[in-house]
C-alpha cells in the first residue's frame, strides 16, 4: 500500500525525499528564465501623461521612499510614511477612475439615447 501512495505522489510530479515532498516544477522554475521576454509596454510616464494627479502622487510616493531610506527612521516610521502615501495614491486613482468613467458615460448617452435632453425641464 505504501508503494502505491509513492507512485501516486510521483505521478503528480512530486518526489518523496526522506519524508519531505517538494514540487519538481517549482524547484526548477523558481527563477525566471533569461530567454523569456516581458511584452513591451509604454513607459509609465507616457501612460500617466493624461492623469497628472496620479503621476504626481506616484512621484510623492517615490520621494517618501527616498527620504525614508536616507533618514534615520525606524521601520515603523517608514511603514507609516509609505502607508499614508499609498492610501493617498489609492484615493487619487479612484478619483481619476470616477472622473473617466463619468466622462465616458456622458459621452455614450447622446449616442445611445439621441432623444434624451441634457438640461431643461422635464415634460409631464
Image (cartoon, rainbow, N blue to C red):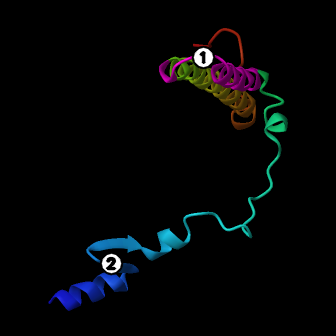
Quadrant of the image containing the C terminus? top right
Locate residue 30 relative to residue 21 in the image: left or right: right
Q: Nearer the viewer, residue 117 or 28?
A: 28
Residue 103, relative to residue 18: is it above or below?
Answer: above
**Does the segment drawn in magenta span residue 63?**
yes
> How many numbered marks are there?
2
Quick one: SS at disc 1? loop
Residue drawn at 79 percent across, 32 percent down: 48
Question: If the image is split into quadrants, where does the N terminus sit?
Answer: bottom left
Q: Name the spot of residue 106 as percent of width and height, x first.
A: 71, 26
Mark carried by residue 72? 1
Q: Residue at x 65, y 28 (%)?
A: 97
Mark 2 highlights which residue? 17
Neighbour tally class for label 2: few under 14, some 14-19, many 20 plus, Cα within 10 Å: few
| Image marks 1 and 2: residues in contact by CB distance under 8 Å | no
Q: How much space separates mark 1 and mark 2, taking CA atoms?
A: 47 Å
- Residue 81, how many percent across, how many down? 57, 17
Answer with the quarter of the image where residue 65 lies.
Answer: top right
Give the main secondary structure, helix, strand or loop, of the magenta stretch. Answer: helix
Asked whether residue 55 is drawn in magenta, I would say yes
Left or right: 81 with respect to 50?
A: left
Q: Residue at x 48, y 69 (%)?
A: 26
Magenta span covers which residues? 53-76
Amino acid at each position: 500500500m505504501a508503494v502505491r501512495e509513492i507512485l501516486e505522489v510521483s505521478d503528480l510530479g512530486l518526489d518523496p525525499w526522506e519524508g519531505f515532498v517538494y514540487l519538481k516544477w517549482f524547484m526548477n522554475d523558481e527563477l525566471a528564465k533569461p530567454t523569456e521576454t516581458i511584452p513591451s509596454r509604454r513607459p509609465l510616464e507616457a501612460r500617466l501623461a493624461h492623469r497628472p494627479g496620479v503621476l504626481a502622487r506616484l512621484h510623492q510616493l517615490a520621494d517618501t521612499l527616498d527620504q525614508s531610506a536616507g533618514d534615520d527612521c525606524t521601520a515603523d516610521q517608514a511603514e507609516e510614511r509609505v502607508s499614508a502615501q499609498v492610501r493617498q495614491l489609492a484615493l487619487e486613482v479612484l478619483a481619476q477612475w470616477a472622473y473617466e468613467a463619468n466622462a465616458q458615460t456622458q459621452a455614450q448617452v447622446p449616442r445611445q439615447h439621441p432623444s434624451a435632453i441634457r438640461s431643461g425641464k422635464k415634460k409631464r
